[in-house]
Image: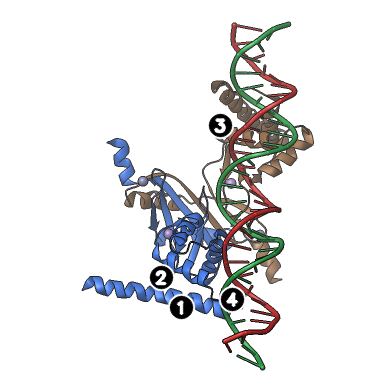
Chain colours: A brown, B blue, C red, D green
Amino acid sequence: MIMIFNFKKETDVKNKEKNLFQNYLSTHKFKHSKQRKGILEIFLSIDRHLTAEELYRAVKQKYPSVGFATVYRTLKLLCATGLCRELKLESGPARYEHLYGHKHHDHLICTGCGRFVEVIDPEIERLQQKLSKTHGFLPQEHRMELYGICPECRNKNNG
Amino acid sequence: MIMIFNFKKETDVKNKEKNLFQNYLSTHKFKHSKQRKGILEIFLSIDRHLTAEELYRAVKQKYPSVGFATVYRTLKLLCATGLCRELKLESGPARYEHLYGHKHHDHLICTGCGRFVEVIDPEIERLQQKLSKTHGFLPQEHRMELYGICPECRNKNNG
DNA sequence: CGGTAAAATGATAATGATTTTCAATTTCAA
DNA sequence: TTGAAATTGAAAATCATTATCATTTTACCG
Ligand SMILES: [Mn+2]
Ligand SMILES: [Mn+2]
Ligand SMILES: [Zn+2]
Ligand SMILES: [Zn+2]
C-alpha cells in the first residue's frame, strides 16, 4: 500500500519534471527530440551526484546511439530549466544533481570514499548573507563544501 | 620614517619566505636553481590572486627564458612549502595566493569585476565544524566562496 | 677548480574535460 | 508533404594542466 502510494508520487514528480522540460523547450523554441527526452528520462532515474560520463554511460544502455556531446548539451538545458545543478568540485569532472524539489543545500564530502551528504545550516546561511553585506556586497550565490572522513571510513581506518 | 620601517619589515618577511623555500628545497634534496629563486621572487612581489599564466607573464619580463612548465612546477613546490595556496574556483584556471603569514580565510568574489575580498567569520567556522561532526564526519578542510556584486559595481550599474 | 651523476629545465606532446564544428539527419510549421 | 532551421553524432578544437625527453644545470667529490 505504502509502496504503491510512493510509486505513484514518484512518477508524478517525474512527470512534473518532464513537463517543465517540455515547457522550457517550447517557450525557448527548442525542438523536442528523442534524445532530449531520453536523456532526461535516464537522468531522472538516477538520484546521485553523477558526472557527464556516468550519465552518458547510463543513457547508452537504453539509447546506444546517443552521443557524448548531446549529453553535455542536454545537461546544460536541464540546468537552464532548473532541473539540474552543476557542481564544480575541488577536483575531477563536474557533477550533476537533481534540483527540482530540492532546497538549496551544501555538501559534506568524504575524502576517503567520495560519499556526498547534503547539508543545510540556516544559521550559516544567515551569517553568509550578513558577511557579504558587511563588505557592501549584494549577495548572489555561494558555494560551500566541507571535506572530512565519514563514519564508515573512520571505522575502516581504525579497525 | 614609517615608510622606511614598513619597507624593512616587508623585506624581512620576504626574506623569511625565501629562507623557508630554500630550507624546503634543502631538506627535500631539491636543487637551488635560478628559476626557482626567480619565480619565488616575482611571486612574492605580486600580492594578488593570480593564475599560473599571469605569474608566467610577470616572470618572463625579468627572466625571459623561463618556461611555462617550470612556473607550474614551482607553484606546486611553493604550495608544498606552505608559501602558496592553490584556489580552484567555480570557473576559470586555478589561482594562487600568498599563504605565509595569512590566516585561513574564505573569499567574497564580485561577479561584476572579479574583485577578491578575503573574509573570515569565526562563527561560521565554528558552525562548519559542528555541522561536520553532527554527521559523524571528522572535519578536514572546507571551501567557501561567496559571490555577489561589490559596492563599486553596484554604483556603476545603478548610476 | 674539472668531472660526473642526478636533477631540473624548456619545448613540445599528451592528457582530460568540455566545447565547437560540420555534414547528415530530424523536427515542425506551413 | 515539404523545406527551412534546429539538432545530432563524430570528430576536431580548445583550455588548463601534466608528462616526456633531450639538453643543460646543479651539487658533490676528488
Ligand atoms: Mn546535492
Ligand atoms: Mn585570499
Ligand atoms: Zn567515506
Ligand atoms: Zn565588482
Q: Label 3 vs label 4: CA separation? A: 52 Å
Q: Which mark is residue A81?
A: 3
The residue located at (46%, 55%) in the rendering is B54
B78 over B22 or under it: above or below: above
Q: x and y percent of residue A12 in the render?
A: 65, 29
Task: Compare residues C9 and A85 and report the one nearer the observer.
Answer: C9
**Both marks 1 and 3 on one chain:** no
Front of the two marks 3 and 2: 2
Q: Indicate the quadrant of ligand 3 in the picture.
A: bottom right
Earlier residue among tags 2 and 1 = 1
**Both marks 2 and 4 on one chain:** yes
Q: What amino acid is labelled 1 in the image?
A: Asn
Front of the two marks 1 and 3: 1
Task: Return the chain for callout 1.
Answer: B
Earlier residue among tags 2 and 4 = 4
**Both marks 1 and 4 on one chain:** yes
Q: Which mark is residue B101?
A: 2
